[in-house]
Image (cartoon, rainbow, N blue to C red):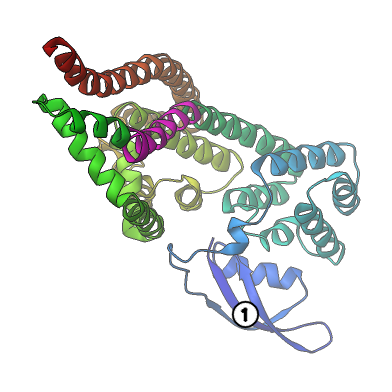
Amino acid sequence: MPEFLYKARDANGQTVEGVVEALSVGDASTILSDRQLAVITLVPRAKKKIYEISLESYFSGVKRRDIVVFSRQLAVLVAANVTIVQSLRTVAKQTANAKLRAIIGDAANDVEAGGRLSAALGKNAKIFSPFYINMIRSGETSGQVEQVLNYLADQMEKDYDMISKVKGSMYYPVFIISGMIIAGFVMMAFVVPKLTEVLKENGGTMPLPTKILIAVSSVFASYWYIMLIVAAVIIVAAAWFLTTPAGKRFYDTFTLRVPIFGGIFQRLAVVRMVRSMKTLLDGGVDAVSALDVTADVVGNELYREIILQTIKEVRDGRPLSTVFLKHPKTVPPMVSQMLSVGEETGRLSEILDRLAGFYTREIDNLIGGMVTLIEPVIILTIGVAVGLMVAAIIMPMYSMSSSF
């Protein structure tokens, strides 16, 4: 969400300075007015570059699940006609996460002082996303804070469950492949050289697979420490590169194109995009603002670029699906066509809901198929690798024994 630097006078006539988050200068001015501040200057703050890493963000300690529970509890208390301030204080007492408990307590103080809930939570943009803040603001405007909180909890639970399934499906192959790499390194650097020494001492002609194995194991045995240093440097360099705009775009492009996993990541981005848009539109947020927020929460740089291009088209009076139709490899044609139908029929929210449901089921089916396929592929790969290594060692031994 855009940030604005302000200088203002408080109720005591003192000059104060700070930063406020809002979708526009007008919204920022309204937020400051609600805080009983008379604006002197209000200017946009330059956005931080994507590759600037925030330690506060990385070590925030507040998980998505914590936010879901907070939203649900707050909705229940508001529905019981408990004031927002009292509801926040009650939820804070029941929150186990110390970081979130402090944030909720500060929000309660701000609301008690006359501020809005959206503005109070918006001070913690690393914890509460622009999507979340915009939905709370729409609920305050329409007087439906309870419904919005319940809706947010529902949508965040769906998003959390979906991402958990994707991550869970990747744990097994990543664990097995990592184990294979470590075991292979240890074998080639320390075990195989001792076995091949025996073969060298006995002399004789060795088959090509054995010669290759001896050459490779000799390199590992002599330079294993250099390999570890090079691997560490590559990992650190790759981690840094992925924090840059070019690196993030490369990674997001790769995840969409990689076999097997690419289809899952593509559908994951689609679900997050259409679900966020639907939620914001249902909350009374206009199309341009909804797209702007969705671009920040979609989680994929390619989709973010497409959504930002779409904003320009929508502002110029063109259909929402115009840009999507130009990127059939990134955005499934079905999404573009359904969005076009939704705009023409005036049932965009319903279409977005149907798309979210369809692609969520697609993700479930792909994950199920992937888990079924990966296990035999990994077993076959391990079997082939072990078989080749064993054959390279046994073949010369068999030749020597048959010569006697």
Label 1 element class: strand
Residue at horizontal 41 percent and vertical 17 percent from the top: 375
Residue at horizontal 47 percent and vertical 74 percent from the top: 46
Label 1: few (<14), some (14–19) or many (≥20) C-alpha neighbours in 10 Å: many
Q: Main secondary structure of the magenta part?
A: helix
Q: Locate the C terminus by quadrant.
A: top left
The magenta stretch spans which residues?
Answer: 171-191
* Residue placed most toward the observer, 211 or 301: 211
Residue at horizontal 65 percent and vertical 42 percent from the top: 64
- Does residue 196 sit above or below 296 in this rendering? above
- Considering every residue shown, the one lying at the far left of the view is 205
Q: Position of residue 384 (x, y in %)?
A: 27, 19
* Amino acid type of the residue tagged 1 in the rendering: Tyr
Q: Position of residue 347 (x, y in %)?
A: 47, 29
Taking the magenta stretch, the answer to whether it contains residue 175 is yes
* Residue placed most toward the observer, 67 or 30: 67
Q: Position of residue 277 (x, y in %)?
A: 50, 40
Q: Locate the N terminus by quadrant.
A: bottom right
Taking the magenta stretch, the answer to whether it contains residue 95 is no
| 119 on left or right of 249 | right
Q: Which residue is mark 1?
A: 6
* Residue placed most toward the observer, 122 or 126: 126
The part of the image, by quadrant, that contains residue 189 is top left
| 362 on left or right of 119 | left
